[in-house]
Amino acid sequence: MMPDSAESPLISPEEELAALQRAIARHDRAYHGRDAPEITDAAYDALRRRNAELEALHPELVDDQSPSRRVGSAPSAAFGKIRHRIAMLSLDNAFGETAFREFEARIRRFLGLDAGAQVALVGEPKIDGLSVSLTYEAGTLVHGATRGDGAEGEDVTANLRTLASIPARLAGAAPHLIEVRGEVFLGKADFLALNAAQEAAGLRLFANPRNAAAGSLRQLDVGVTAGRPLAFFAYAAGAVSETVAETHWAYLARLRAWGFSVNPLSERLDGVADAAAFFTRVEQARAGLDYDIDGVVFKVDDLGLQRRLGFAGREPRWAVAWKFPAERAVTVLQDIRVQVGRTGALTPVAWLAPVGVGGVLVTRATLHNEDEIARLDARVGDTVVLQRAGDVIPQIVSVVPERRPDGAAAYVPLAHCPACGSLAVRPPGEVVRRCTGGLVCPAQAVERLVHFCSRRAFDIEGMGEKTVVAFHALGWLGGPADVFRLGAREAELAALEGWGELSARRLVAAIEARRRIGLERFIFALGIRRIGETNAKLLARHYGSFANWRAEMAGAAETGSDARLALGSILRVGEAMAEELVEFFTEPRNRAVVDELAGLLTIEDAVVPGGGGGAASGKVVVFTGTLETMTRPEAKARAEAAGAKVTDSVSKKTDFVVAGKEAGSKAKRAAELGVRVVSEAEWAELLGGPG
C-alpha cells in the first residue's frame, strides 16, 4: 500500500512505482469522484514526480511504471458520459529551473535545432481548478464535460451553462466544430464565503478552492451550481474542424474575441531566460491573486511545432508545468523498520515523530535503500529534515548532526527477510536487498495479488489490500487464478463477518466482469519485474495477441533464437527488461500461472494506435542512416503514431528498413534477408498514402 498518511505502510523503491500507481488512483477517486481530497493538492501533484526521482536514484529499477502516466479518474456513474474527440491528457512537471531548461533542451534535440536556437513559449499561470472541455457546433455550446480519465468525462453541460464566463454562443466567426478547453475555478474570497455559509448551515466544509469548485460543478441539482460564483479561464483547444490560428498566442486572442476569459497574466516569451523571469514574477504575485495557482504552464507557441513534437505517453512534449517549491519540516527519526515488496525487495522505512507538512500529518518516510541511509548517515534518534515536495511519500532530505544523541548507532542492513526469515541478499550491481524466499514469502504473495487486482491491472472493485490479505489468510487465494474461483465460495463469503449476501454477490459480479481483459492490462497484472504499465502496453502493441506474445516469449527463452533477438530489438526494450521477461518465462511455475489464467479469461488483442489500415499499420520498421527532413526521435514517433512497430535491428520479421544517408550494416542486412528498403521520401509517402 502506498503511503499518503500517518497510517499507511511503505514499500521498496522497486515496488514504490506500483504503489504510487495504486495511491494516485485512490486519491483520484477522492479528488475527482467525491471532491473530498485526503491529501493536499501539492502532495497529490507530488506523486507524479516520484517516478522520475526514483529512476534518477535507482536507474537499474527503471520500468516505466509511473503514476504520472495516469490522467484523472473514471467518470462518475451519477452523470452521463461524453467521450472526448481528442484525449484530455495531463502535463509533465518541472521542479526548478534546471528541470525546466532540460524540458526546453529536449524540444531542441527532438526537432534537431541548434543549441543556441530560441523556442518561443507562452507562459500561463497554472490554475488550481477543474479541467473541462466545451464543444461548440455552429457557434453554439452543445456539450460540456469534465476531463474524467482523459478519454471520457462526465456530462456537466447543464451545470456549465450557468457560468457567466462561458458563452452560450461564440461571438463572431468560428469553426463549425471546436472544443474549447480550460479550467473552472472558485476565487479565494468566494471560497471563504462559501465555507462560511456551509458552516452556518451545518454542512461539510470544502478542503480548498479547487475542491469547492469541483463539488459545485458536479451537482446533480443545477440550481446549486447556479448559486455559486464559479469562473472559467479558457486556455487550450481540442478537436477543431478548421485551422483557427498558427500560434498558441494567436489562439488565445481568438478565445478572447469569441467571448472567453483568458488569464490576463499570460505572456508570449522569447526563450528560456524570459520564461524563468516570468516564472519569478508570477511566483511573487501569487499571494496577491484572488485565485489559487500552483505553478506556471509553458507551451511551445508555434502550433506547427506542437504537432511535430506530439505526445510521449500521457504528456505532450511541447508543454510543461513548472511547479512552485514545496515545504519542509524538522522532526525526529524514532525507528528504522524494513518492509518487503512484491518481488522481495526490502525497503527501510523511517518512523518519525509526527509532524505537519503541507497540511498533512506525517509519521513515516521512505529511506529507499541501505546506500541512501549511508549517504544521509541517518540513525535512530537523529533530528531530520523532511520534504514532501515531489513526494507524497515523504523523504528525508538531510540529518541535523549537531542534534544527534549520544550513542546513536549506524544502521545495519538485515541479513534475513522480516516476513519469512529467508536469507536477504543484495545482487551484484544493485542497491536493493532482496528476500530469497520467493513463493514461501507471504509478503510477496500478498503484494503480487494486490497488484494483480489493482485498478490499473484487472481493476476488480472490492479486491483491495484488506480483502486480499483476509482471503489469503483463509487459504482462498494462493495465486492469481484463484481470484476467478472465488465465485464458487459466494455462500462462504456471505457468511463472513462484515460481508453478507449483497456484498458477496457484488464482489463475485465484479470478478466475473473482469474475465475479459486487454492484453496490455493482462501483461501488466502479472507483476513481472520492470514491466510497468507503459512497457506492458509497448509489448502488447508489438506482439498484438496473447497467443503470439505467449509463443514469442517461450521462444525467447532459447539463447540466440529469432524470438530472443526480436525481443531485444524492440524500441525501448532494454537488455534488463528483456532478461526479466526471459527469466519469467523460463520458470515453469510462471508459465503454468499464465496458461492457467488464459484458460479462465478472454484476453483481447491489443489496439494499435493509428491502426486504421494505413500502409504502416502493424508493420515492423527499422531506421538507419541520417535522415534529412526530421530527427530520428521524430521519425520513430511518427511511425508509432501511424501504427508501426519500430525496432532497432533487422530480422526476418522486419517489414521496412528506412534508409537515410550513409545507411550501413542494417541496409546490408536487409538486402541479405530480402527485407524491403525504402528511402526517407518513400517512407513519408507510405505514411501519408492509402493503406
Image (cartoon, rainbow, N blue to C red):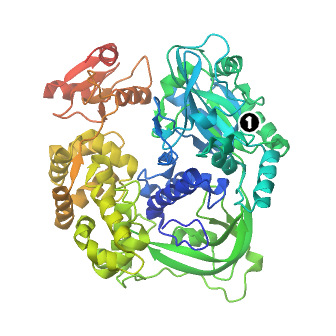
Single out the residue that lies furthest toward the top: 173
Front position in the image: 6 or 102 = 6
Seen in the picture, residue 160 relative to 40 is either above or below; the reply is above
Q: Is residue 355 left or right of residue 600?
A: right
Would you identify the image quadrant in which residue 374 lies? Answer: bottom right
Single out the residue that lies furthest toward the bottom: 407
Seen in the picture, residue 542 relative to 3 is either above or below; the reply is above
- Residue identifier under label 1: 276
Seen in the picture, residue 171 relative to 54 is either above or below; the reply is above
Please say whether residue 573 is visible from this viewpoint. Answer: no
Would you identify the image quadrant in which residue 529 lies? Answer: bottom left
Q: Position of residue 89 (x, y in %)?
A: 51, 38
Q: Amino acid at mark 1?
A: Ala
Q: Which quarter of the image is occupied by the C terminus?
A: top left
Front position in the image: 263 or 586 = 263
Please say whether residue 513 is visible from this viewpoint. Answer: yes
Residue drawn at 68 percent across, 27 percent down:
122
